Image (cartoon, rainbow, N blue to C red):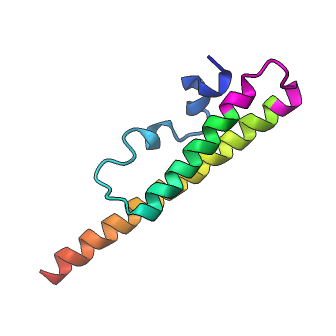
Amino acid sequence: MPAVLEKKSLSTSGSAVASARPLAGLELDDTQEQMLLSIAREHCKLVLEHGKANASVQRRQQIREEIQSLRSMRDDLFAEWRRDAKNELRLVSLSQ
């Protein structure tokens, strides 16, 4: 398994706990789903490139950094959507 997919590499980012069931309770619209799919597609392309025998050590390091950036972007989106969902719940409870 490529190093970028190992669980230990997830925990070094500090997002492993935040990523556990990140979508639980969130209802995403089409735009949000497309954003996540775009991130996932790019991640998959990078993983495939990382696994190629002709990938240089420098490129593999660059790929790992790009994947970490995608993970951060994903986690930021989840955090934003959670905040929005909490704010909506708060507004609904105040209006009742």
Where does the image place residue 92, in percent across and percent down from the top left?
20, 76
Image quadrant occupied by the C terminus: bottom left
In-image side of 9 versus 51 (left or right): left
Q: Indicate whether 68 appears above or below 73.
A: above
Where does the image place residue 28, in percent across and percent down from the top left?
37, 59
Q: Kindly give the residue lying farthest to the bottom in the view shown.
A: 95
Residue at image coords 54%, 24%: 7
Residue 48 falls inside the magenta stretch: yes
Image mark count: 0
Where does the image place residue 78, in percent across and percent down from the top left?
46, 54
Q: Indicate whether 63 appears above or below 89.
A: above
Residue at image coords 17%, 83%: 95
> Residue 12 falls in which quadrant of the image?
top right
Image quadrant occupied by the N terminus: top right
Residue 84 falls inside the magenta stretch: no
Q: Which residues are magenta?
A: 47-59
Q: Indicate whether 38 appears above or below 93.
A: above
State the residue in front, 39 or 76: 39
State the residue in front, 44 or 24: 44
